[in-house]
Amino acid sequence: MKHENSDRSEHNDHCVLRPTRVNHLAPSRKLVILFLIFFTALGVRLLNWHDRRNEAAAVQSSVVLNYKRQAMLIRTNGIASISDASSSTNDPDLLGHPLGYPILLSLIQRAFDESDTVTQLVQIILDSLAAVIICLIAFQLFPTAVGLIAGLLAAFAPQFSWNSILLLPDSVAALPILLAVFLILVARNRRQHPEQAASVGRLARYEGLLLILAAGALIGVSCWLRANALLLAPFLALWFTINYKRGERLRPALVLVGGAFLIIAPLTIRNSLVFGKFIPLSLGGGQTLIEGIADYDSDGSLGLPQTDMELIHREALTYQRPDYAGSLFTPDGPARDRARLSRGFAVVRAHPFWFASVMVRRAASMMRLERTPLRLETTGTGGWPNLFLWPLRSVQRLFITAIFLPLTLLGAGILTYERQFQSLATLLVVPCYYFCFQSALHTEYRYVLIIHYFFFVLAAVGIYTIACKLIHQIYSRKTSVSLNSSKRKS
């Protein structure tokens, strides 16, 4: 009887999400799990690419052409041309996006000519690695099963699969941010458990700071790909106030911000030298601000343009400059973007409470899963391919907001109930950044793709807890049946 009760207690304890329950699985077994997740993600993405690669190439075609054009100019004129004000590489029309993705495309073009296929395959591999990294993040916080579930959710999600084959930088920009969060967690855990560090004493402390510096640099790399994460490093520095003791917070926070600054600064300096203006990464803040406001101005009472074409044509009329109607940024791109920002801020000052409600509504919309058409299609010819694709299609049908939003909220509620505030803060700090900053601007799903990796970990916590409760109930029933049976025999 005593033995049965101790078994039951031990079984129930394994279902509790405590820091002391963080997995200690053998490295070889963890490696098997990571390989499983990577190749699952890779296989799903390759199937999606095989069926829909031509359709993906047509998404945001004008933006894709701009990226390809700048990549071709960099390849033709050389990488040094990006700092030459007289070079055709530095066309002001191309200031709407940072240089990172065109540089990546130019490297691929140099090796494989102008191949969309190779670009898509590179992005597929990087996106498959992102599923592995979110599993590693979960391993730092929760039992192994939670990491496995989170990694598989990221591997199967049609939203990630679809965006990974678009000729756009959004899925690629998510990977450095995930790596940054992972390195920050490794640094924290090594500080809390010095025996895990490769060195001891003062060297261990500097090892942690180097990891945090690398994390900041990775955020900077993401900014070179997409400008949305420009303020992420200062915002992420707030995480240290929850996870580090008083008196130990400032140094790692400054190191994180410094790492991001070191990577972003060269692009800012280049923009200053080439265009003679302070442009941290790229232009477009004013454009996305006023168009983002117009998205929620249903009756048009604010008189703001809703599209790029409407914006430039209105500017041509307002300023009596017909040449403004041909481009967002040529001529006078920096001055025009500042004027757009001023116009948007004027609306915010005039309608602060309404604009706050806009931000809340847009932030809430970020939590939905994109209505991505199912990409795994049957061939219609029968045979084993259909037998293989049918279960994958069935799994992907489950990736809808009605299922995953409750699971995400359940996971957050469980961590709150169990007072796992550090783990919860880790999973919410990046989404909260986008809620606070991206919600002020025009937003598309691909801009906030990164937040759903962290939501999948919360959903995994919910799934894991539900599974544990069900298993515990089944185990309890079997135990009570066996006890009753033994009593009858006695």
Image (spheres, grey):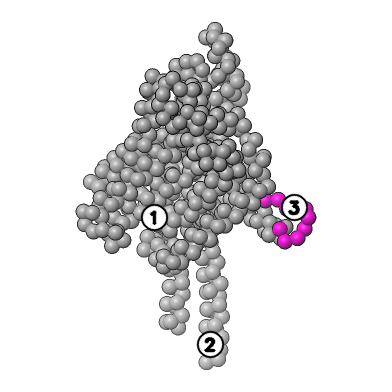
- Residue 486: which numbered mark, if any? 2
Q: Secondary structure at mark 3?
A: loop
Q: Residue at x 37, y 45 (%)?
A: 215
Quadrant where the N terminus sits is bottom left
Q: Earlier in the sequence, mark 1 or mark 2?
A: 1
Q: Which of 446 and 141 lies nearest the eye of the viewer?
A: 446
Boundaries of the magenta span: 376-385
Whether residues under marks 3 and 1 lie with C-beta atoms below 8 angstroms apart, the answer is no
Q: Which of 167 and 289 lies nearest the eye of the viewer?
A: 167
Hey, what amino acid is under mark 2?
Ser
- Residue 153: which numbered mark, if any? none
User: What is the distance, in whole Å, between disc 3 and disc 2 at their CAs?
Assistant: 57 Å
Question: Is the magenta region chiefly helix, strand or loop?
Answer: loop
Q: Residues within 10 Å of mark 2 (few under 14, many from 20)?
A: few
Q: Position of residue 28 (x, y in %)?
A: 44, 66
Query: Disc 1 designates what residue?
Result: 419
Residue 380, relative to residue 84: is it above or below? Answer: below
Determine whether, in the image, residue 33 is placed left or right of residue 252: right
Q: Which of 200 and 429 lies nearest the eye of the viewer?
A: 200
Q: Residue at x 41, y 57 (%)?
A: 141
Query: Disc 3 designates what residue?
Result: 379
User: What is the distance, in whole Å, between disc 3 and disc 1 at their CAs?
Assistant: 49 Å
Q: Residue furthest top?
A: 320
| Residue 196 quadrant | bottom left
